[in-house]
Amino acid sequence: MSATHDLPQATAPSPRRTNAPMPAQRQLIRARRLVPMHALLVVVAVVTAFPFYAMVMIAFQPGQAIVLPDSMFPETLSLAAFQDALNSQNIPQWALNSAIYSIVSVVIVLLFASMAGYAFAKKRFAGREVIFWVFIAMLMIPYHLTIIPQYLIVGQLNGLDTMWGMIAATIANAQAMFLMRQFIYSIPDEMLDAAKIDGASEFRVYWSIVLPQTKPIMATLGTFVFLWHWNDFLWPMISQQSPENYVLTVGLNTLQEQQVPLATMMAAAVVSFIPTLIIFILLQRYFVRGVMMSGMK
Amino acid sequence: MAVATGSASVDEAAQKAPQPPVRRRQWWKSKSAIAAYIFIAPYVVFFMVFRVLPAIYGIGLSFGEYSLAGAFEFIGVDQYVKLFDDPVFWDSLWVTLRYAAIAMPLTVVLSLAIAQLCNRMMRGMAFYRSIFFLPAVTSPVLSGLIFVWIFSESGPINRLLSAVGLAPISWLQDSFWVLPALALVSAWMNFGYNMLILLAGMLAIPQEYYEAASIDGANAWQRFWRITLPSLRPALFFVLVLETVKSFQTFDTIFVMTGGGPVRASYTLTFMLYDQGFGYFDFGYASAVGVVLLIIALVFSLIQRRLVGRDD
C-alpha cells in the first residue's frame, strides 16, 4: 500500500517536463519540505498516541495523583497496580472469558463462513439467490434493533449467562460469509474439477483444495473477528449476569463503577490492550487489506 | 454490483459446462446440490435463528406489549403513538442529531486531512500510519475509560487550558460541552479507519492528473480541490455514510463516559433503547425506538445509493 507517486515521474519523461526543476534542485526542495511535514506528522502522532501513553503512565504510578505535565516522565515506576489488578480482582477470569469468546468465535466463524462461502461461490442449488440476498439485506438492519429479540431468543434456549449462548448469537456474520464467497469465487473451477475427477469427495475438495487457498482471507477475517469480539461490549454485558462470566470490557466498566483506584483500573486496561497490540503488530497488513476492501465496494 | 454479476456468471458457467445428463427438474437432487445444502446448513441455521428471526421479531415487538412474565400482546401502533408523545424521545432524537452533526463532519474532515498528509512517499510514513490506525483497533470501553480521565477536572486538557490562561471546563458534566467531548473521542477512534479507505481512493488517482495541473500552474490547494476531492467521491461518500450511521448508533463510549448524562444531555436514541429495554424491560417500547433507528439507517443508505450510483 506504499505510495509510489514520485517514482513514475522520474522514469517516464514527457516532452512537457522541460520546465521541471533539475533533479538535484528538486531533491533540495523536497528535503526542505520534509521538515515541516515530519513536524506536522509528529504532532498528530503524539496527540493520537497520548491516551495510550497516559494509560501506561497512570498504571505504573499507583497511589499518586496523576498530574501533568509534572509526571510526563515519572522517575519511579511501580508494578504494584498490576499486582493489585491480577490478584484482587476477577481480571484474570475476565481475560480468560474474553480469550475464549474471541478465539472460539474466530474458529467457528472462519469454518462456517468458508463452508457457506464455498457453496455460494461454486455450487448451484435451489434458493441460492434468495438466501444470499436475505444475508445481504440483513446488513442494513441496525444491531440495536435485533439485540432485544436476540436476548429473548437466547433466553428461550437457556443460553443467558453462558459462554455458548454468548458465542452462538454472534457467529452468523454476513460480512464474513460475503468476503469468503468473493474470495473463493476467484479460485479456478478447473482445480476443483480436477480433484473431483481424481475421485475426491465433496468434503475433501473443500478441505484439501479450497480451504488451503483461503489463507489470506482467513488471516484478514480472523483479525477482524478477533478484534470485534475482544472489543465487544453491549452483547456480553446484556447476556452475562454473573460477574465471573464477564468479559474484560464489561469487567473494566464495572471497575469504574466500583471506585477501584485509577492506577489499578488502568493496569487492567493495559492488560486488556496487550492482545490487541500483539494482533495489530503481527497482522496489521491483513487488517489494512480488509479495511481497504471494504472501501472499494 | 459485483454480487449480481458474480452470481450471474456462476450460473452461466454452470449451464455451459458439460454436465452429466441430469434432468432439469431434478438437478437440485444432484450430489453436488446436496453437498451445497450441507455446506450452508450451519451458517443458515445460525443466521436464521440469531439474525433474521430477531430482525422480524424486533419489528413485531414494536407493535405489542411484552410483559416480564413473557406474555406478548398485540397492541397495534400504540407504542409509536406513545413514542411520538414522549418528550424523552424527541429530546433523545435531538441529542442524537446534534451529536451526529458534530461527530460526523469532525471525523470526516480530520480523516481527509490526515489521509492527505499521509499520501506521500517518505521515510517513516509506515510508522506514522500505524500510530494513526491504533485507536481504530482499541475497544470503545478502553478508549472511554482513558478519555474520562483526559476530560476530568484536573485532566490534561484542563491543564492545557489553564496553562494558556483559560478557565477549566467540566467537559463531561457540562450539558453544552459533553457532546463535543464525546465527538472528539469518536474522531480519535475512527479517523484511522477512514484514513485508510480514503488513502486507498487517493492511490487510485492517476498521477498524470496532478502533473498536468502543476504544469498549468495549479497550486496545491487547487489540485486538492479540483482533482483529489472529485476523484475521491465514491470513497468519500462511503466514509460519510459509514460515519453518519456510526454516529447515530454510538453507544459504548457514551455508556462508559457519561451514562447518558448530565441530565440526559448525552441521552441518544441507542441509550433510550437500552434504558427502555434493559432498564425497564419494556421490550415493545424499546423496539419501537429500534424501528426508528432502522428507518434512519435505511434513509441514509438510500441516499448513499443515489449519490454514488449517479457517479459511476
Image (cartoon, helix red, strand yellow):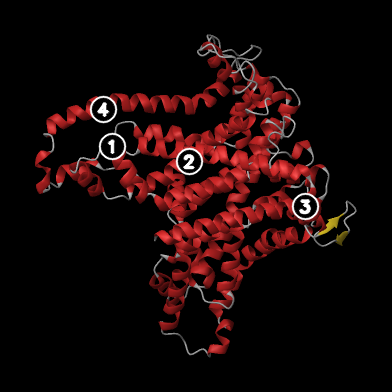
- Would you identify the image quadrant in which residue B246 lies? top right
Q: Are marks 2 and 4 on the same chain?
A: no
Marks 4 and 3, Cα distance to the nearest angstrom? 60 Å
Marks 2 and 3, Cα distance to the nearest angstrom? 40 Å
Q: Which residue is mark 2?
A: B108
Can residue A126 be seen at all in this image of the molecule? yes
| Chain label for disc 4 | A
Q: Amino acid at mark 2?
A: Val
| Chain label for disc 3 | A
Q: Secondary structure at mark 2?
A: helix
Q: Position of residue B213 (x, y in %)?
A: 23, 45
Can residue A285 be seen at all in this image of the molecule? no
* Mark 2 or mark 1, earlier in chain: 2
Q: Position of residue B110 (x, y in %)?
A: 46, 36
**Comparing marks 1 and 3, which lies closer to the viewer?**
1
* Residue at x 43%, y 61% (from the top left corner): B310
Marks 1 and 3, Cα distance to the nearest angstrom? 59 Å
Q: Amino acid at mark 3?
A: Gly
Viewer-proximal residue among A222 and A30:
A30
Residue A33 badge: 4
Q: Secondary structure at mark 1?
A: helix
- Would you identify the image quadrant in which residue B121 lies? top left
* Residue at x 13%, y 34% (from the top left corner): A23
Q: Which residue is mark 1?
A: B220
